[in-house]
């Protein structure tokens, strides 16, 4: 955290030192070069004091990792918390460049669909991911397509549209680093993350 | 034929450890035999010392372009700094047509006079020469400008040494968390500056046509959203934050519109947004397929994009107002991440062969496809604004690095970063 604040200030200094107009003969101010630095906050943004009017805000939070499972621990004995229940399986894996759900995951998804249908207040975030191969932007779309495929199956089996939030991180958040089919397979996935019960 | 040349570019003492580590080091890994010999004589210095070695920067620029082969310093027969000191007869013994001389002087260490002259050795004539007055902080920039003028005088084409690069750096912390930084540097990788930092991924930086703004994708709010940011002020605007994906921004040649991928309708489609009014025009209507990564043709009337409507990702072209899409790529099962040269003639893309990804270029007139790279983990190609080089991301020892290759595939260089993953490069336009 401290580094972040220091670096903002350091950046402003670097910027200040580099933003003099150069005043070259025979050329206009195309050479003037002041870049603004921005530090993204957890939710919201602070622009660094590049022109003196910026704001330096709070510490940077943990981003999406701060998403909390609402009411965690409050529902002892919930089937979601039973490690023997099919609901404990919250990751579905895919083949390369595919968003087709494999037969082995049908039972898991059936259990989640039943849980969602029985608990209308339950909310789940479907987070789609891909392996590291190929175009990052294409993979972003592919991750979303995987998450939507899961949503569709769960809805056919009784869950409601308003219980879902769909996001994709593409290849940006691999479960495993490194090459090889074993790593790649672990990364081609949709995570079911319960955000409310 | 591999010439290996390490050009260590150490300059400003960076105040941030992050930035100090982020210095790019350029390594030329494959030369071009067609490179033009040129004699770059070390500039003369008078008065206060200068913080930059101008002639070294010019020499490195010219070599980095792949178009020039500067003579080794020890081959230079004398060190003239202006015309009166040149014995052209002697210089004709070297096989170099061009001879660059110059000098730098300062009486106060704050303002510097820099002058250069480029001569045609055989005609004993000056091709171009200029004198500048700059503050110490402007010395690097003047060096790049001199290199641009030498390049233009001898090749007839515009140099791109005064342009900048944008890219994303990823720093992995000890606890496994990541720190993303959107950075810009000079075209030689020097002078890296962080313009955005986030704990969440940053993707797809794209320059506005005047080179003063960047659009990009940031996950700072937990999902992919499109922002634009002014480089001078740091002012940023969340442009597209619709439900679903907001990604793959691309600035139109007139600077008024942004092509983008939105999945707010349930499926990723190409849209064009008017930046001032935020009015959206939907361009594709594929309903089932992934349509993404739109880039503009230089005419501003057409978009080139990636779609898997045919089963696998391939590159298509469509009118920017919508209409029938025409497939452009037919070689290989996977072509994605397109970019178009400024003259509209060449398409560069990621091209898969046997499960590996290379950078390829397709001549849009003849349809010929040329695979330019060999590493097999190559992605995100971006044309230099003069169309001569293609900057791309690849991997070395498990780390992301940037590399560049000439459009003919003969000249290769790496912009190796020391210790930090770099990716998602975007070459800026030439600033007017």
Image (cartoon, coloured by chain):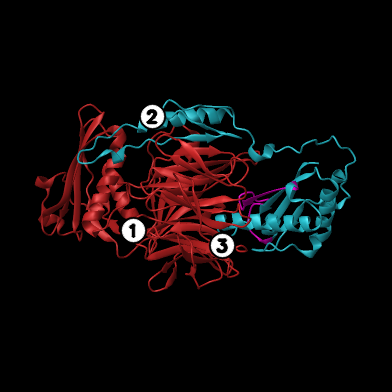
In-front residue for pair A78/A82:
A78
Q: Is residue B369 left or right of residue A28?
A: right
Q: Nearer the viewer, mark 1 or mark 3?
A: 3
In-front residue for pair B258/B30:
B258
Q: Residues within 10 Å of mark 2 (few under 14, many from 20)?
A: some
Pointer 2 and pointer 3 on the same chain:
no
Occupied quadrant, residue B145: top left
Q: Residues within 10 Å of mark 3 (few under 14, many from 20)?
A: some
State yes or no: residue A165 in magenta: yes
Kindly identify the residue that appears in the image at 55 percent across and 27 percent down: A57
Q: In the image, residue B157 lies at what x, y percent?
A: 26, 58
- Label the red chain with its letter: B
Occupied quadrant, residue A184: bottom right
Numbered badge on residue A16: 2
Chain letter of disc 2?
A: A
Magenta-tinted stretch:
A163-181
Q: Secondary structure at mark 1?
A: loop
Q: Is residue B9 left or right of residue B133?
A: right
Q: Measured along the vertical axis of the image, is residue B331 above or below residue B40? A: below
- Label the cyan chain with its letter: A
Q: Which residue is mark 3?
A: B285
Q: Secondary structure at mark 2?
A: helix
Q: Residue furthest right?
A: A77
Occupied quadrant, residue B370: bottom left
Q: In the image, residue B350 lies at what x, y percent?
A: 50, 62
Numbered badge on residue B66: 1
Q: Is residue B186 visible?
A: yes
């Amino acid at each position: 955290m401290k580094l972040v604040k220091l670096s903002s200030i350091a950046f402003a200094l670097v910027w200040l030192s580099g933003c003099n107009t150069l005043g070259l003969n025979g050329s206009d101010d195309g050479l003037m070069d002041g870049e603004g630095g921005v530090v993204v906050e957890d939710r919201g943004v602070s622009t660094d004091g590049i022109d003196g009017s910026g704001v330096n805000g709070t510490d940077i939070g943990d981003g999406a990792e701060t998403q909390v499972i609402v009411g965690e621990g409050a529902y002892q004995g919930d089937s979601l918390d039973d490690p023997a229940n099919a609901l404990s399986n919250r990751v579905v894996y895919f083949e390369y460049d595919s968003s087709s759900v494999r037969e082995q995951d049908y039972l898991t998804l059936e259990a989640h669909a039943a849980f969602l249908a029985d608990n209308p207040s339950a909310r789940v975030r479907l987070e789609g991911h891909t392996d590291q191969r190929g175009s990052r932007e294409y993979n972003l779309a592919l991750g979303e397509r995987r998450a939507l495929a899961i949503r569709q199956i769960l809805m056919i089996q009784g869950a409601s549209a308003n219980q879902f939030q769909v996001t994709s991180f593409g290849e940006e958040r691999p479960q495993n680093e490194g090459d090889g089919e074993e790593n790649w397979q672990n990364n081609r996935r949709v995570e079911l993350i319960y955000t409310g019960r | 034929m591999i010439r290996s040349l390490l050009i260590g570019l150490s300059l400003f003492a960076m105040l941030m450890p992050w930035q100090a580590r982020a210095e790019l080091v350029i390594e030329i890994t494959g030369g071009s035999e067609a490179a033009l010999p040129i004699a770059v004589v070390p500039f003369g210095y008078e008065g206060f010392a200068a913080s930059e070695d101008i002639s070294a920067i010019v020499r490195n620029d010219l070599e980095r372009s792949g178009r020039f082969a500067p003579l080794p310093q020890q081959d230079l027969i004398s060190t003239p700094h202006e015309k009166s000191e040149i014995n052209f007869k002697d210089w004709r013994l070297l096989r170099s047509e061009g001879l660059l001389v110059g000098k730098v002087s300062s009486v106060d260490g704050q303002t510097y006079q820099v002058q250069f002259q480029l001569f045609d050795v055989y005609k004993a004539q000056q091709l171009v020469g200029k004198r500048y007055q700059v503050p110490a902080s402007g010395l690097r920039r003047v060096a790049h400008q001199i290199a641009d003028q030498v390049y233009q005088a001898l090749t007839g084409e515009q140099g791109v040494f005064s342009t900048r690069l944008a890219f994303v750096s990823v720093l992995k912390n000890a606890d496994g968390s990541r720190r993303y930084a959107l950075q810009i540097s000079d075209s030689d990788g020097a002078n890296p500056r962080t313009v955005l930092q986030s704990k969440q991924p940053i993707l797809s930086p794209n320059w506005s046509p005047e080179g003063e703004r960047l659009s990009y994708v940031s996950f700072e709010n937990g999902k992919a959203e499109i922002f634009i940011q002014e480089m001078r002020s740091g002012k940023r605007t969340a442009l597209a934050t619709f439900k679903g994906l907001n990604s793959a921004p691309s600035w139109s040649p007139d600077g008024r519109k942004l092509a983008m991928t939105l999945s707010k309708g349930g499926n990723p489609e190409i849209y064009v947004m008017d930046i001032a009014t935020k009015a959206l025009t939907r361009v594709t209507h594929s309903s089932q397929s992934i349509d993404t990564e739109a880039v503009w043709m230089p005419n501003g009337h057409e978009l080139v994009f990636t779609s898997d409507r045919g089963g696998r990702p391939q590159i298509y072209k469509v009118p920017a107002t919508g209409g029938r899409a025409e497939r452009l790529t037919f070689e290989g099962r996977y072509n994605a991440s397109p970019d178009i040269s400024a003259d509209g003639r060449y398409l560069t893309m990621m091209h898969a062969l046997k499960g590996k990804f290379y950078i390829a270029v397709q001549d849009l007139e003849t349809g010929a496809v040329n695979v330019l790279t060999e590493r097999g983990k190559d992605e995100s190609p971006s044309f230099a604004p003069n169309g001569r080089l293609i900057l791309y991301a690849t991997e070395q020892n498990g780390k992301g690095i940037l590399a560049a290759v000439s459009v003919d595939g003969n000249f290769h260089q790496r912009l190796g970063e020391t210790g930090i993953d770099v990716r998602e490069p975007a070459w800026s336009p030439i600033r007017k």
